[in-house]
Amino acid sequence: MARKKSKYLHHIKDLPVIMLTEKSKAHMISSQNMLISIIENPAGCGFPMHSHPAEQIAIILEGEAEHTCGDETFVFKAGDICIHPSNIMHASKTITRVKAIDIFCPPREDYLETLKRALKERGEEE
């Protein structure tokens, strides 16, 4: 039996798929004060050194990545959580296939705009 569409309850598979890079894809959802990105990256997928005003909490669910945050570089493994303060330089490159969750507070403006476009293309309100 199909569920009635809720304004509060969502399922990952129903969220828009956003291509973050040529290889990296994410399902995204936002609220007024945060944005969550559920990421799937193949091995060898990278994000170059960058920063953003939003604080970020990254959680690795599956796989491993070489990750740099500030002046530290480490292997980021399933179960690990990295807290990125606002405007800190960071980068990542997957060693294996990775599934992860990124939480941004406040929402990253560039991701928010991309999400709004994807929702508009699907004919949905934000």
Image: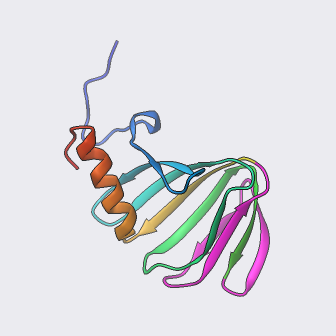
At which x and y percent is residue 100? 61, 53
Which region of the structure is painted magenta?
Answer: 70-96
**Residue at 74% from the left image edge and 55% from the top image edge:** 44
Towards the viewer: 94 or 53: 94
Residue 107 in sight from this viewpoint: no
**Residue at 50% from the left image edge and 49% from the top image edge:** 26
Question: How is the rendered protein coloured?
Answer: rainbow
Q: Is residue 100 magenta?
A: no
Residue 71 in sight from this viewpoint: yes
In the image, taking residue 121 as reference, residue 102 lies left or right, namely: right
Determine whether 108 is above or below 25 in the image: below
At which x and y percent is residue 35? 40, 60
Towards the viewer: 40 or 84: 40
At which x and y percent is residue 51? 52, 80
Q: Quadrant of residue 54?
A: bottom left
In the image, taking residue 13 as reference, residue 50 lies left or right, namely: right
At which x and y percent is residue 123? 21, 38
**Residue at 69% from the left image edge and 47% from the top image edge:** 42
Can you name the residue that lies furthest to the bottom here? Answer: 71
Q: Quadrant of the N terminus?
A: top left
In the image, taking residue 79 as reference, residue 123 lies left or right, namely: left
Can you name the residue that lies furthest to the front here? Answer: 22
